[in-house]
Image (cartoon, helix red, strand yellow):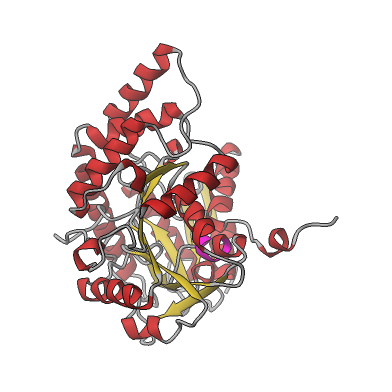
Amino acid sequence: MSLSQIARSIKSSPTLALNEKAAILREKGDPVIHLGGGEPKSKAPMDAILAASAHLNTGEVRYAPADGIPALKQAIIRYTEEYYNRKVSPKNVIASGGAKQALMVALQAIVNPQEEVLYPSPFWVSYPEMIKLCQGIPVCAPAEDGSFYPTIEDIEQRVSSYTKAIIINSPNNPSGAMYSEEFIANIVEYCEKKDIYLIMDDIYHRLIFDGKKPINCFDYAKDKSENSKIIVINGVSKQYAMTGFRIGWAVGNKKVIEAMTNIQGHQTSGPSVLLQKAAVGALNGIQSSVESLRVTLENNRNILMDRLNAFEGVKTYKPDGTFYTFADFSHYEKSSMKLSNLLIDKVQVLTVPGVEFGMEGFLRISFCGTIKDITEGIDRMKWALDLNSPNELYIGDRKLVRDWA
């Protein structure tokens, strides 16, 4: 079969594949614990449900403008003013089918074939594949000290004359690391000096812990005109636990938003008007659900870290935000893919291999599920890996005997 070069170069999403595997195992009745998930278990805000329901009851569910309905754009404008202290117009905003589509369309609007897009490591699994879909070159920039916190020097040394954009995701998926104000200030200044696009993937920016506050990239921008090359990506999936609603957005200069709108108009047209109405309800409604989720996640994080820190041989890193931790399991197995498969096969615990995020030997472990899943999941993992654990384990009524080294 003849496929395009782009099709042959793109890998499947490992996180989506894990979700599918978990669903299949659960359908079979297997007691699988999914610690690789990327969606909170709390329900969508009631204001979102009521807004969608009210519109559905009209029976008028029609096409939406390619860049989003006016009500959602106004809600995003208000959100941008509140959280970014930045006044923008409707022409600076596009609503998309999730933050992922907003990011994809932004890349398609600015990246030419063979131009480079740079991002720190570890990185979200889709960045390199999305860049390749634009026929661009993905460039990973790991921190020289091996940490999750890059310096501006780590970025600078990988920038070339072909660099078109830098993507910054803070708090970071998969590590939960929140980059410092100094780093964000430096990266904004550097991109302005070099005339490079800066794409801020802020999808987790309100899900942060230990009293930290969201960092606003616009606070450090000197150019706040329509020539600004800052593009901010956000959405309702994470902070409002509305993953299935698939509504995200981008805020940027009018020219780039117009280009993104033209591209999106031919790709998918505007997102479902029904789901946009739900997003309006979430953004304009009572915001207590966001803080409730944040507090729940912080508590879950603390429980997970206590369990992992008692796990001999595992190097842990306390996340500043998101609902993931990225732990080093290389003491047990250098190949994160082998390790992840072992845990699925032996104890039915799903994790995401670190190699998919650019760092081998690590596993991404999610804490957005229940406390029961977190504690039982880590207990199962410890039994599977730590030979000092008892030789037997019960999962429900099923008795397991460790028969591997």
The answer to whether residue 140 is left or right of residue 201 is right
- What residue lies at 26% left-to-right and 71% top-to-bottom? 184
Residue for point 55% across, 51% down = 16
Q: Quadrant of the N terminus?
A: bottom right
Q: Residue at x 34, y 48 (%)?
A: 92
Q: Residue 111: where, in percent of width, then height?
A: 53, 64
* Residue 157 location, quadrant: bottom left
Farthest residue to the left: give it.
211
Instruction: Single out the residue that lies furthest toward the top.
Output: 58
* Above-or-below relation of 268 to 200: above
Q: Going by the image, does 285 lie left or right of 31?
A: left
Q: Nearer the viewer, residue 45 or 100?
A: 100
Residue 174 seen in this snapshot: yes
Quarter holding the C terminus?
A: bottom right
What residue is rendered at 27% in x and 51% in y?
A: 297
Q: Position of residue 378 (x, y in %)?
A: 40, 60
* Magenta-colored span: 125-129
Coordinates of residue 68 in the picture (x, y in percent): 41, 36
